[in-house]
Image (cartoon, rainbow, N blue to C red):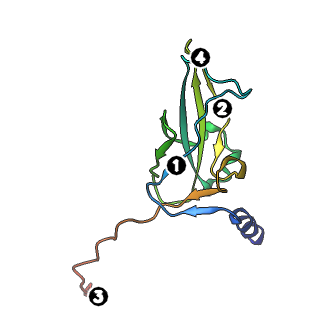
Amino acid sequence: MGIALLFVAALAVGQQVYYESTPTLEWEPVTTDSDGNPFLAGDTVEYEVLIWDMAQGDVTLQPASELSPIGTVSTTELQLSFPYRSEWAVAVRTVHTDSGGNVTMSDLAYSTVEEDTASGPFWYSPVLTWIPQRPSGLRDSGM
């Protein structure tokens, strides 16, 4: 158990947690291919956004097919919504479609990886935004 706690502590160092239930994720636009060549006029670029429950392990070790898709957009931002309270990593990849309909995808960029973020690694932890109703009808069971 001590090793597990040490691992969690090491993972948390230098990472920001955003306690938001519906945050807006933003990123820089992709305008070139991996060789630095600009996309052509007939090309389209979209971004696929996926999330991963960090309680299931390191997001960077998972195949993209195991992550939960949140949406695909042509803009460089997306308001996120999480299915339940946990700690969520986010991944984004570029989806490029050329004028002939050929689709290629970039590698994933992760919110938990220093090189992929603008101001350091981060993840989201949705907060409870409502208060449950208080109990009513209190009584003794008669036993």
Disc on res. 102: 4
Residue at image coords 53%, 46%: 26
Q: Are marks 3 and 1 in contact (CB under 8 Å)?
A: no
Which residue in the protein does label 2 denote?
Answer: 106
- Could you tell me how far apart the alpha carbons at marks 4 and 1 are, in whole angstroms? 27 Å
- The residue identified by callout 3 is 143
CA–CA distance in space, label 3 to label 1: 55 Å
Which quadrant of the figure has residue 65? top right
Q: Amino acid at mark 4?
A: Asn
Give the alpha-carbon distance from disc 4 to disc 3, as whole Å: 73 Å
Q: Residue 55: x, y in percent?
A: 61, 57
10 vs 81, left or right, is: right
User: First in sequence: mark 4 or mark 1?
Assistant: 1
Camera-side residue of 43 and 51: 43
At 29% from the left edge and 76% from the top edge, which residue is drawn? 134
Distance (Cα) linking label 2 and label 4: 14 Å
Instruction: Give left or right: position of 109 versus 72.
Output: right
What is the residue that sits farthest to the top in this orientation? 100
Residue 68, image x, y percentages: 53, 43
Report the residue that reaches farthest toward the right. 3
